[in-house]
Amino acid sequence: MAAATTTRYVENIHPLHAVLVAGSLPLFLGALLCDWAYWSTYEIQWSNFASWLIVGGLFFSGCALVFVIVDAFRVASHGRGWLAYAVTLLAAWIFGLFNAFMHARDAWAAMPGGLILSLVATALVIAATGMAFCRWRAGARP
Amino acid sequence: MTRPCSVVAPAIAAILVACGGPQPVADQHGPDPALPEPHRGILPNMKIAEPAEWGERKPVVPEGYEITAIATDLRIPRQTLVLPNGDILVAEGRGGNAPKLKPKDVIAGRIKAEGTSPVTGGNRLTLIRDADGDGRYETKTVFAENLNAPYGLALVGSSLYVANQDALVRFEFVAGATKAAAPPVKVTDLPSAINHHWTKSLAASFDGRFLYVGIGSNSNITERGMTAEVDRAQVWLVDAATGAHRPYATGLRNPTALAIQPGTGALWTVVNERDELGPDLVPDYLTQVREGGFYGWPYSYWGQHVDTRVKPEAPDKVAVALTPDYALGSHVAALGLAFSTPAMGAKYAEGVFIGEHGSWNRPDPAGYKVVFVPFRDGRPAGPPVDFATGFREDDGRTYGRPVGVTVDPRGALLVADDLANVVWRVAPAVPQ
């Protein structure tokens, strides 16, 4: 029997992919905290900070999505949980995008929608980061 | 997985609700405009003018009137002033130094710039002269330069006042001169930090002792914070001799033009109201300015309609907010105001001309024309009448955008066009 070799996406995701997905977490989380600060103080500067943090989060998670899309075509079979990860990351990005639109509203018009969307996007990106790092460890215990 | 869903559902619902558009409002002119509920979609409506050359075209004026371009190749003409000998001064410039504070500012600023002239603002006053009175202005010369986005103009005796975007200055004016003999003297500084709405409109009281200066807000609706709004969105009363000043009226979001009513001496203004509440909110307006009056911005619009985008709220301020006299329609961007004279012809003898720069925050463009609001017994009476149109075609091509309007007492309306960089003159074909 000839040894069958298949390309599998195993063990760890690409380090740059890891940086991108993990990096979007503090950005979305920072936006959430800034939104909370604006919500509780009416100090507009927090809302400005949140707007830019969301842009940063969209950039990082967007680049991570490029890795996911490339992998989708490049890798013949994916590890368990891959699809859930891809969908969760995509959802985080889409909620982040709507959150950016929500934050483009002037002053309190961004509330409470901006706070809710920040909460959802942050939860999704935490879940996505967890999935990115917790799967694909197919090897035996040391 | 049910927990996140309970959060997601309201967010999705909020987005869906935001998508449904309101019904268009038929009429928003006059003292009692229809005001729909506020509405804002996922993205603001942005419909930007597509600049085009006039070529052989001209604005369309009423039958019996002629329109001529009396000065071309200007550098962003905004307001004009007719001098006693019939010469015309044109203030040219582009102001504002608001930093891009949010991602939105970067994107929206670029889009809005598409609808304006690419020419660099002149920061100067140009004088144009028709020496032989044939209606052709054969002289065009720089009267004063190195100004800072000049806008409002007023002449009192031998004092020519110019409202730069950062200061009110005075030139010594000599009748018949084509150039200022000396640099101007500062009367008073004007609020200029950020200068989101940078135009400083100007009018002089009948006796010339006082000047009224219109100062716009520093934001659409306080999104730059309330500290940026100190001394903003108000009309100042300035003592011409000393420069001392105090607020004359407040809560006027962007009072872009001021005019003194002939006969009464009352101060009138046109005000640009807030954006992003939907295509039919909030109507820009024409109003007599009552001394000490508060006109709502930012807390409320058109009297007691609370704007929930402003926090913290100020119910005590809302309670005393005055309702403006006359709605001009939402987003028309009224930038010019001038009282008429019988020399303009019987139909336009009593009332005001208003230059409407035109909308960006509306799917169905509004403004882009000059209208006439008829007056009777010193008050607006009846709907606005189109006086100069054809600045924008239905296909979006935009040839010009009216700004300042000035009535030449000999019977002509001057219209500054800051897209085509032209000053238009509309006069009865047969002098009245």
Image (spheres, rainbow, N blue to C red):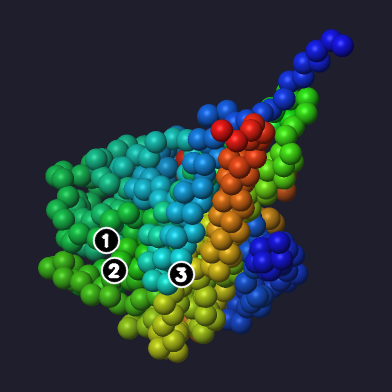
- Nearer to the camera, A122 or B291: A122
Q: Is residue B209 visible?
A: yes
Label 2: few (<14), some (14–19) or many (≥20) C-alpha neighbours in 10 Å? some
Q: Position of residue A134 (x, y in %)?
A: 61, 42
Between B417 and B206, the residue placed more toward the observer is: B417
- Whether tag 2 and tag 1 are in contact, CB under 8 A, the answer is yes
Q: Residue furthest right?
A: A1
Quarter occupied by the N terminus of chain B: bottom right
What kind of residue is marked 2? Asp
* Residue drawn at point x = 68 percent, y = 55 percent: B363
Q: Are marks 3 and 1 in contact (CB under 8 Å)?
A: no
Circle 2 marks a residue in which chain? Answer: B
Q: Which residue is mark 1?
A: B191
- Report the disc number at residue B86: none
Q: Secondary structure at mark 3?
A: helix
User: Measured from the top left, where is residue B160 in percent x and y?
Assistant: 23, 56
Mark 1 surroundings within 10 Å by alpha-carbon count, few (fewer than 14), some (14 through 19), many (20 or more): some
Comparing labels 3 and 1, the label whose residue is closer to the camera? 3
Say if labels 2 and 1 share a chain. yes
Callout 3 crowding tier (Cα within 10 Å): few <14, some 14–19, many ≥20: many
Query: Which mark, residue A39?
Result: 3
Q: Identify the residue at horizontal 66%, vertical 63% (top origin).
A: B4
Please, is residue B18 above or below residue B199 in the view?
below
Checking the image for residue B231, the label placed there is 2
Amino acid carrying label 1: it is Pro
Q: Is residue B128 left or right of residue B49?
A: left
Q: Quadrant of residue B382?
A: bottom right
At x 49%, y 68%, the residue is A108
Earlier in the chain: of badge 2 and badge 1, it is 1
Where residue B204 sits, quadrant-wise, is bottom left
Residue B100, image x, y percentages: 41, 47
